[in-house]
Amino acid sequence: MKRTFTARIEGQEFTVEHDDDGTVTVNGRVVAAARIVAGDARHLRIGSRSYDITSLRKEEENGSYHLLLNGMSLHIEIEDERAALLKSFGGEKSTKVHSAVLRSPMPGKISRLMVKEGELIEAGQGVLILEAMKMENEIKSPAAGIVKAIRVAESDAVEKNAILIEIS
């Protein structure tokens, strides 16, 4: 299975494809690449160049990393296919609400509700599964609180920005 992602490194953008057979393609060009992982340290060889990589910090929300690459500090953003799809549907904006109303980031079908009205939930807790484009997406609560109202039921079809759950 081919995995595709976009990497933004210090203002430059790279499209990277990685096949199960180990083939790596960067911006349409096949490159010889090998990776060795030892604890938090990683060694990467691309072509004839070698890199020692140490992860300093990962910011979970947006796929940003702060790394040491051969001793030099870098800021890297990684966006996989799923994140790019959510972004194209406006998912980043619509799931980060401040009014405690959880909206659908994309059109789809509710395949499973994971909370009940009156239940106490935490920020980041999964509240339902939204099926879209044959993928199951766990939708998480933007805030801690009590589930005030569930506006959908399992098997309901929803449009983008439809109100799913209200949290008080």
Image (spheres, rainbow, N blue to C red):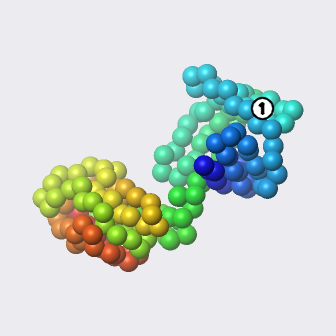
Residue 15 on image: x %, y %: 71, 55
Q: Is mark 1 on a helix, strand or loop?
A: strand
Residue 54 on image: x %, y %: 64, 29
Is residue 24 visible in the rendered structure shown here? Answer: yes
Q: Quadrant of the C terminus?
A: bottom left
| Label 1 environment density (alpha carbons within 10 Å; few <14, some 14–19, many ≥20) | some
Q: In which quarter of the image is residue 138?
A: bottom left
Is residue 142 visible in the rendered structure shown here? Answer: no
- The residue lying toward the viewer, choosing from 167 and 134, is 134
Say what amino acid the circle numbered 1 marks: Arg
Residue 99 on image: x %, y %: 31, 68
Q: In which quarter of the image is residue 74?
A: top right
- The residue lying toward the viewer, choosing from 101 and 33, is 33
Residue 91 on image: x %, y %: 46, 66
Q: Residue furthest top?
A: 38
**Residue located at (34% from left, 70% from top):** 109
Q: In this view, does 44 lie to the left or right of 120?
A: right
**Residue located at (77% from left, 32% from top):** 45
Vertical side of 149 occupied by 38: above or below = above
- The residue lying toward the viewer, choosing from 43 and 113, is 113
**Residue located at (33% from left, 59% from top):** 129
Q: In this view, does 79 lie to the left or right of 105?
A: right
Q: Mark 1 points at which residue?
A: 45
**Residue located at (60% from left, 49% from top):** 1
**How many discs mark residues in the rendered view?**
1
Q: Is residue 19 left or right of residue 164?
A: right
